[in-house]
Image: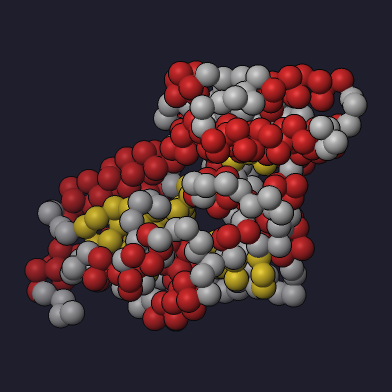
């Protein structure tokens, strides 16, 4: 696309404007901001290979938009640059992740979902950054995204110098690990771009070995159909029986590949109050969460990422965790409360819930 004289005049000293954009972004609560061009041809090849392998499972939306995902200018006509930003989310004071995972009677919720839904938080900050740019250069064309459109966030952030793609497919940064959200502003401003980050995984494959279900089938290759985050969040139907025992007490998402990554020893708690723990979800008992009514679920989890999966899938996930807890606890006292909670929902109106409850109770008494 030809860059118009108007666009160039708006940018003025492009290097100075780029520095200002990064400074404004950090003042708004982003830990890093970078600028990328729109050439994602290499990432597009990997995307098409991934889709061709069927690794996206039921996520039809991954294929629905075709190459718009890897061609920013087709998603938002006129796009020349992408301003990429990251925001840390690791909540301060949360119960240690490994401690929760070892406690089979407790529910493990992915650390990103313990607080307020990041979509709204990130979108507001990106809009504020776009407004600040407007106040400097006048009206310009842009659209802001955060996990809300067919956008290759990791590939763009990598090109913008925010980090590199780890073997678990998440973005990694040397001084921050991987516990952060990504957001983007597609713009027609011809800003100078940043250098892409170098790769620093080396021969390490801790993340691959740590995956409970073997979903990381090779470096940089994730079969979502086996991924616990996919199974407990994106997947709408019955969780495959052969994978249920491997899920353990992970009832919403999974962090094991991040927990195993050596770079996450440099991760820092977020200063963002919106991502602080809510409802005691960092240390909640499975049976206690399972006892929530649908009204309680909707009220308590309003404004959190978890609410979007709905009450039925929440109970499904908890039933799997409780079944695994019963198997691990044997005749220990906590198992009695878990079994009683499951039996109370044995006749639940949802066939999906009833199926998973029956499976869970069979783990407690396999002979009936």
Give percent across and percent down for residue 13. 24, 67
Q: Is residue 279 left or right of residue 363?
A: left
Quarter of the rendering occupied by the N terminus: bottom left
Q: Is residue 177 above or below residue 316?
A: below
- How is colour applied across the structure in the image? secondary structure
Q: Could you tell me which residue is drawn at 59 percent across and 65 percent down? A: 223
Q: Is residue 216 above or below residue 42?
A: above
Q: Is residue 362 left or right of residue 273?
A: right
Q: Is residue 280 above or below residue 317?
A: above
Quarter of the rendering occupied by the C terminus: top right
Number of numbered discs overlaid on the protein picture = 0
Give percent across and percent down for residue 288. 66, 20
Q: Residue furthest front?
A: 368
Q: Is residue 165 left or right of residue 106?
A: left
Q: Could you tell me which residue is drawn at 33 percent across and 44 percent down? A: 123
Residue 273 visible? The answer is no
Q: Could you tell me which residue is drawn at 10 percent across and 74 percent down? A: 5
Give percent across and percent down for residue 164. 55, 68
Viewer-nearest residue: 351 or 342: 351
Q: Could you tell me which residue is drawn at 90 percent across and 26 percent down? A: 331
Q: Is residue 214 left or right of residue 173?
A: right
Quadrant of the rendered image containing residue 155: bottom left
Viewer-nearest residue: 33 or 326: 326
Q: Residue furthest right?
A: 331
Give percent across and percent down for residue 362. 77, 36
Residue 63 visible? The answer is yes
Quadrant of the rendered image containing residue 63: bottom left
């Amino acid at each position: 696309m030809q860059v118009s004289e108007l666009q160039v005049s708006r940018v003025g000293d492009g290097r100075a404007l780029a520095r200002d954009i990064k400074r404004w972004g950090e003042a708004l609560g982003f830990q890093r901001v970078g600028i990328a061009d729109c050439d994602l041809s290499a990432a597009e090849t990997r995307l098409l290979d991934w889709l061709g392998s069927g690794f996206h499972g039921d996520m039809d939306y991954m294929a629905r938009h075709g190459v718009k995902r890897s061609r920013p200018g087709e998603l938002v006509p006129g796009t020349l640059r992408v301003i990429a930003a990251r925001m840390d989310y690791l909540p301060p004071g949360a119960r240690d992740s490994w401690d929760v995972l070892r406690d089979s009677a407790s529910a493990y919720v992915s650390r990103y979902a313990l607080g307020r839904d990041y979509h709204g938080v990130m979108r507001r900050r990106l809009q504020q950054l776009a407004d600040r740019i407007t106040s400097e250069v006048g009206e310009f064309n842009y659209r802001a995204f955060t996990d809300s459109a067919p956008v290759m966030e990791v590939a763009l952030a990598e090109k913008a110098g925010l980090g590199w793609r780890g073997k678990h497919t998440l973005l990694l940064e040397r001084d921050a690990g991987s516990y952060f959200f990504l957001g983007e502003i597609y713009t027609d401003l011809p800003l100078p771009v940043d250098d892409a980050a170098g790769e620093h995984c080396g021969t390490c494959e801790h993340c691959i070995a740590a995956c409970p279900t073997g979903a990381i089938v090779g470096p940089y290759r994730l079969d979502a159909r086996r991924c616990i985050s996919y199974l407990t969040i994106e997947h709408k139907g019955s969780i495959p029986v052969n994978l249920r025992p491997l899920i353990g007490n992970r009832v919403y998402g999974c962090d094991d590949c991040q927990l195993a990554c050596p770079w996450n020893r440099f991760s820092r708690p977020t200063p963002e109050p919106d991502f602080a723990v809510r409802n005691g979800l960092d240390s909640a008992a499975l049976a206690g969460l399972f006892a929530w009514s649908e009204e309680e679920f909707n009220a308590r989890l309003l404004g959190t990422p978890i609410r979007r999966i709905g009450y039925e899938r929440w109970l499904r996930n908890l039933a799997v965790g409780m079944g695994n807890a019963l198997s691990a606890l044997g005749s220990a006292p906590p198992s009695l409360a878990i079994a009683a909670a499951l039996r109370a929902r044995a006749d639940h109106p949802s066939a999906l819930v009833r199926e998973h409850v029956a499976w869970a109770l069979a783990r407690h008494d396999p002979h009936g």
